[in-house]
Amino acid sequence: KDMLPETNIVIDTSSSISYAEAELILVEVKAAIVAAKISTVNILLWHTNSYYTNTYKDVDQDSFNEIIEDIFDNWEGGGNNVHKVYDTMIDLGWTKKFTIHLTDGWIRPHNESDSSTYELAMEALDPSNTVWGIIIPNRSISSNYWQDMQEKFFGEVIPIFLDMDKFR
C-alpha cells in the first residue's frame, strides 16, 4: 500500500548541478520513493522555464531507472525563474502534493509573504508536505549560509552535501 500515493520531484537544472551530481542525488531519491512504495511520480525540470514534465505510474526500482534516463535525456541548463514552476504545477493539477524540490538554493526567497513568489508557491505547494533538498557540491558552508537557506524556504529544508572528488 502506498504511503504517499503521488509525489512531485522538481529539479532546478539552471546550470548549478552537473549530471554526475544529479545522478548521485537521484539514486538516493529512488531509494526513498521505492521504500515508501510511491506509485505515481511527477517529474518537473526547470530553469528559465518549466521545460519538461512527465507523470510515471506504477513506479518501482526498475521503472525509476527509466525515470532517471528520461531526466538525463531531457536535461537542459539555463537561467532560473521559479514562477514558471508553480504556474506549470497549477496548470497540470499537481498542487498540494508531497513535493521534493532539488535546487542549489539560488532562487527567489519563498518566505516573504508580500512577494509574488510566496503567493504562487503557496498556491502550488503544501508547506507541511514540501522538502527542499539544497545541493551543496564541493564545499563546506557557514552556519550563516545555512540559516539563510532555512529562512528562505518553507517546509523541510535539508542540505545535500556532495564531495565530487570522491567520484572522479
Image (cartoon, rainbow, N blue to C red):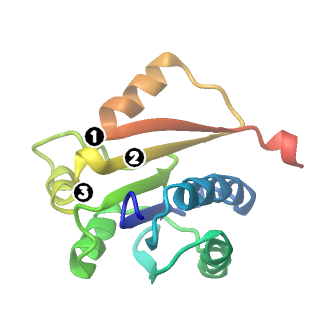
Q: Residue 15, how many percent across, how many down?
A: 59, 60
What amino acid does circle 1 point to? Phe
Which residue corresponds to the image point at 60% horizontal and 81% vertical from the top-left?
74
Callout 2 secondary element = strand
Q: Residue 161, how many percent across, how many down?
A: 64, 36
- Neighbourhood count class around disc 2 (C-alpha, 10 Å): few under 14, some 14–19, many 20 upward: many
Callout 1 secondary element = loop
Q: Residue 121, how many percent across, how many down?
A: 22, 56
Asked if marks 3 and 2 touch (Cβ < 8 Å), the reply is no
- Neighbourhood count class around disc 1 (C-alpha, 10 Å): few under 14, some 14–19, many 20 upward: many
Asked if marks 1 and 2 touch (Cβ < 8 Å), the reply is no
- Nearer the N terminus, badge 1 or badge 2? 2
From the image, tell me which residue sits under label 1.
Answer: 154
Instruction: Describe residue 130's horizontal placement relative to residue 119 as left or right.
Output: right
Q: Is residue 156 above or below residue 101?
A: above
Instruction: Describe residue 78's horizontal placement relative to residue 119 as left or right.
Output: right
Instruction: Describe residue 140's horizontal placement relative to residue 50 as left or right.
Output: right
Callout 3 secondary element = loop
Quarter location, residue 29: bottom right
Residue 105 is at least partly visible in this image: no
What amino acid does circle 3 point to? Leu
Quarter location, residue 2: bottom left
Quadrant assignment for the N terminus:
bottom left
From the image, tell me which residue sits under label 2.
Answer: 131
Asked if marks 3 and 1 touch (Cβ < 8 Å), the reply is yes
Q: Residue 139, how many percent across, how many down?
A: 68, 31
Quarter location, residue 125: bottom left
From the image, tell me which residue sits under label 3.
Answer: 125
Q: Is residue 127 above or below residue 18?
A: above
- Nearer the N terminus, badge 3 or badge 2? 3
What amino acid does circle 2 point to? Val
